[in-house]
């Protein structure tokens, strides 16, 4: 390894091998889960030994954490400054992310599998997903407040519910898409849902129950 200003910089061949292992881990954990997917499975994909994978990552738990970090980096790699935008631009970014996700099923699959597993006891990714959802809710909440101020909307009681709902609908659509890609247009369905929630905060419409009519409301009067 080379050193630059006191920090250690991995050699190019080492960095390449690490990325190969991470991509193999994404496929393995995405198809088998983190419990059933083994380091031996990953090592076989990249032509290494189990010990070779451990040499690069130390443990399966470390590899799992770095898979999630690798996914996060891929999320923002195309953005200026490599971080998501704030304010109303965040909503456009979420729509763009849904469209990008439709082109990277492996990344979506490992995220969906690991986020589902994270609700189980003592899972190594629990803390990651707890913090990820907490942070994203706060960022979307702040974006909603900026948008409401921009559009002159003062009644923002629905913001907390809307922030959680956007994350839920994006993740839920990803699950349906992974199960049956031919039935779900991930990009368009996600865009519709995000726009609907944003517009619901800015311009609340009738409640769903207001569309329900009782039999006496619709049947002809007797007589």
Image (spheres, rainbow, N blue to C red):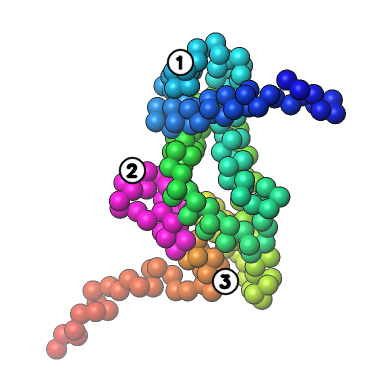
Name the residue furthest bottom.
Answer: 223
Place residue 72 in its image quadrant. top right
Name the residue furthest right.
Answer: 5
Q: Nearer the viewer, mark 3 or mark 2?
A: 2
Quarter of the image with the C terminus is bottom left
Residue at image point 45% right, 15% down: 40
Quarter of the image with the N terminus is top right
| Nearer-N-terminus badge (1/2) | 1
- Left or right of 149, for residue 49: left
The boundaries of the magenta stretch are 169-192
Badge 1 density bin: few <14, some 14–19, many ≥20, Cα 10 Å = some
Q: Nearer the viewer, mark 1 or mark 2?
A: 1
Residue at image point 62% right, 40% down: 73
Residue at image point 48% right, 66% down: 196
Q: Which mark is residue 40?
A: 1
Q: Is residue 189 magenta?
A: yes
List x then y, in percent, for residue 162: 54, 59
Mark 2 highlights which residue?
179
Q: CA distance from mark 3 to mark 2?
A: 33 Å
Question: Could you tell me which secondary element the residue under label 3 belongs to?
Answer: helix
- Left or right of 83, for residue 42: left
Place residue 219 in its image quadrant. bottom left
Residue 120 visible in the displayed image:
no
Q: Is residue 44 magenta?
A: no
List x then y, in percent, for residue 76: 62, 47
Mark 3 highlights which residue?
202
Q: CA distance from mark 1 to mark 2?
A: 27 Å
């Amino acid at each position: 390894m080379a050193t630059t200003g006191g920090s250690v910089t991995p050699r190019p061949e080492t960095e390449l091998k690490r990325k190969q292992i991470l991509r193999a881990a994404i496929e393995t954990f995405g198809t088998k889960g983190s419990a059933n997917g083994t380091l031996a499975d990953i090592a076989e994909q990249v032509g290494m030994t189990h010990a070779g994978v451990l040499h690069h990552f130390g443990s399966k738990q470390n590899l799992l954490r770095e898979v999630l970090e690798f996914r996060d980096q891929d999320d923002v790699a195309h953005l200026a400054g490599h971080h998501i935008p704030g304010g109303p631009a965040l909503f456009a970014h979420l729509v763009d992310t849904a469209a990008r996700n439709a082109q990277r099923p492996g990344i979506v699959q490992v995220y969906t599998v690991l986020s589902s597993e994270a609700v189980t006891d003592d899972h190594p990714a629990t803390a990651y997903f707890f913090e990820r959802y907490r942070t994203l809710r706060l960022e979307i909440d702040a974006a909603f407040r900026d948008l409401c101020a921009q559009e002159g909307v003062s009644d923002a009681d629905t913001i907390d519910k809307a922030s959680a709902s956007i994350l839920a609908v994006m993740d839920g659509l990803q699950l349906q898409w992974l199960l049956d890609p031919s039935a779900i247009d991930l990009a368009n369905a996600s865009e519709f849902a995000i726009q609907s929630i944003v517009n619901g905060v800015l311009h609340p419409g009738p409640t769903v129950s207001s569309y329900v009519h009782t039999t006496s409301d619709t049947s002809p009067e007797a007589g």
